[in-house]
Image (cartoon, rainbow, N blue to C red):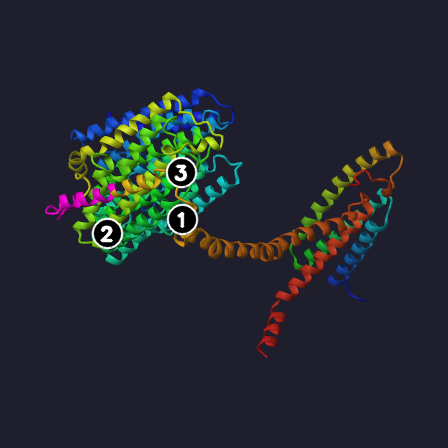
Amino acid sequence: MMEMYLYLALFAPLAGSLFAALFGASPKTLWTGLITSGLLFTSFVSSVILFSYLLSGGEVIHVEMMTWMATGNLYIPFGFVVDEVSATMMIVVTTVSTVVHVYAIGYMDHDKGFNRFFSYLSAFVFSMMVLVMSDNFAGLFIGWEGVGLCSWLLIGFWYHKETATWAANEAFIMNRIADLGMLIGIFLIYWNTGSLQYDKVFAEVPYLDIDTVTMIGIFLFVGAMGKSAQFPLHTWLADAMEGPTPVSALIHAATMVTAGVYLVIRANPIYDLIPDVGYMIASLGAFVAIFAATMALVNRDMKRIIAYSTLSQLGYMFVAAGLGAYWVALFHLMAHAFFKALLFLGAGNVMHAMDDELDPVKMGGLRHAMKWTMVMMTLASVALAGIYPLAGFFSKDKILEVAFSGDHYILWGTLWVTAGLTAFYSFRLIMLAFFGEKRHEALGFHPHEAYKYVLWAMSPLAVLAVIAGWFEHEFVHFITHLLPNFEFHTHHVEMILIIVTSMIALGGIITAIMLYKNGPLSKKWEERPCYKVLINQYFIPQFYEEFFTKPYRELSRVLWKEVDMKIVDASVDGIANTIYGTGEKTRHMQDGNLSSMLRWMVIGLLILLTLAAAFSFGTSDTVQQALSDLGAI
Amino acid sequence: MMEITLNHYLILSTLLFAIGLIGVMRRKNLLMLFFATEILLNSVNIAFAAISHYYGDLTGQMFAFFVIAIAASEVAVGLGLLIIWFKRTNNIDLDAMTSMRG
């Protein structure tokens, strides 16, 4: 019975995608949006049923749909598992994607590619479900590549825009680089354990050489770095904001980018054995957290600010996962998915209202026109800043506690500062967009609130952004069936930590409100070198352009012009030209005159006879002997 | 008196073959072409028979019989075609047969 729900949850999005694809080339038809959303809702309901089944103490559901590969010792089935971790992920994915589907009906209202959009979006959800539900690394990799492909399709959805296609390709290529690492990790796993099934691999891993496990851990994490846009593969995420906003909300905030965190959580038996690698992951996460937060401080593109914030929050998750607090990472992943998707959808409303203008400096005073969007975005920002009693408070605070508990005071300090920065840039955005003077009026914008049903569609996320943290204890109890519990050694300072963290978050909010109360800061700020560094993203994109892209382009050009054109093409063309020329010259032999044909036949006969004679002469013993004598001398 | 050896037969065969070959190449009359072909086949028959006799093996002579039989049928078919051709075009000159020209 539960298997049916599993298949329903998994394949309903696929059915929706295929259905929408049938009408992909036709103009907008409302019911493709409705049907895909309906199927997504079915998937959501099935996920909830599965989740509550597990919650009420049901067995882990493990099905093997069919064999995928069986050759020799290699056996990989299409197997799916619904355990505590994948059920949580399923809830997150289907909740956010159902909301985003409904939202997109309104958002993509006037778009020519309406049907195509829904086909891609549902295909993404299907891939994501495969990713989280697979019971082996091969299936996970298929889902992993599937979400990568759908991300490429959706970032480049407005393919007539040069920047969009560029961003899509950038995201795809960066992910390919990282996926190579992941593939090597998977190969290493198979090579050393002889299986790719999670349960078999994790049972085998403790008996492996520690160096091998370290290699596996590092290579798998390289894959996670690409998908979760960790430094130095982070540049694609901000550029991916070229895609439609529902895509940013679903893929580049709530689900796909968290796949890297999911991988580390899923592979926790591996990472438990190699705390050094875990510490490296945590350090990188803390670095990315503050690094991305600083870039968000000055950016003047609404969606990019939120994208950097996502990057920063992913850093937080990796700190928790790296330090062995897997359930904390998953908890923050879940809470973050809700409030960050809400933030993005709110930004989408603002974009629509402002005719795709993204610079918050040009907005101001939008609260009059867009009251509910303002309320929901503020709510999401408060949750993101980590203010009691919203979702972000519980999850983010736990991560700081994890860092403190392991005596990693540097990590803790970094995250603590980042918490302040997070609060600051979130409210900088809110203040600039919704409060202060109506700067947009001078620029001729006439903002309007989004459709009613769009706001209603967003409301579940708003509710979840508020309440998701309240079920912490139930969640811990539930998830530690599968994930190891984390021993906190901070009971004596717990209250102090909470107060200290809340103080800096509140401080960040108040600073932002005070600074941006009267609109944007003066232009003088933009002259300062630190502003220049931050607005140019630490010059990293330029660095990549200069040191990777340009040399690579030059190398490709040389290979094309010199090697391909002059060697490969030339030899192929040469063969073709020779044959063509020979045919051209010899076709006069076929003049249709029987007599001359007979003469050619005789000539052919003579040539064959000569060859036969020469050959028999050449292979006769005496000649062979004479030849070898010659060679011997 | 000089004894006739295998070589003499082979030389005769070669000469006949050469004559036949030149006939095939030079003749423009279809009928003459058939004659030349017959000469070619018969030169081979002579070689077969002589070598067969030399080795005391009847296979060669048997082969010569087969060649004769095939030559006969070939001529029968060929002459039939030739007559049809002549009826149609009133001409059996090779140079005029260019319907196969590419």
* Residue A76, percent from left and from top: 32, 41
Task: Please state which of the two labelled residues, at mark 3 or mark 1, is closer to the viewer.
Answer: 1
A496 within the magenta span: yes
Q: Which image quarter is the C terminus of chain A in?
A: bottom right
- Estimate the spatial distance between the alpha carbons at disc 1 and disc 2, rounded to whole Å: 27 Å
- Estimate the spatial distance between the alpha carbons at disc 3 and disc 1, rounded to whole Å: 19 Å
Q: Which image quarter is the N terminus of chain A in?
A: top left
Q: Nearer the viewer, residue A587 or B35?
A: A587
Q: Residue furthest bottom?
A: A633
What range is drawn magenta here?
A484-506
Residue A413: mark = 2
* Residue A190, percent from left and from top: 31, 49
Q: Taking B73 as reference, is A302 left or right?
A: left
Q: Nearer the viewer, residue A614 or B70?
A: A614
Q: Which quarter of the figure has residue A374?
A: top left
- Which of pointers 1 and 2 lies earlier in the amino acid sequence? 2
Q: Amino acid at mark 2?
A: Gly
Q: Amino acid at mark 3?
A: Met
Residue A525: mark = 1
* Residue A63, percent from left and from top: 27, 33
Residue A428: mark = none
The answer for which chain carries disc 1 is: A
Residue at image position (85%, 50%) is B26
- Kindly identify which residue carries mark 3: A302
- Which of pointers 3 and 2 lies earlier in the amino acid sequence? 3
Q: Residue furthest right?
A: B90
The answer for which chain carries disc 2 is: A
Q: Amino acid at mark 1?
A: Trp
* Residue B9, percent from left and from top: 76, 59
Residue at image position (16%, 29%) is A56
- Estimate the spatial distance between the alpha carbons at disc 3 and disc 2, rounded to whole Å: 28 Å
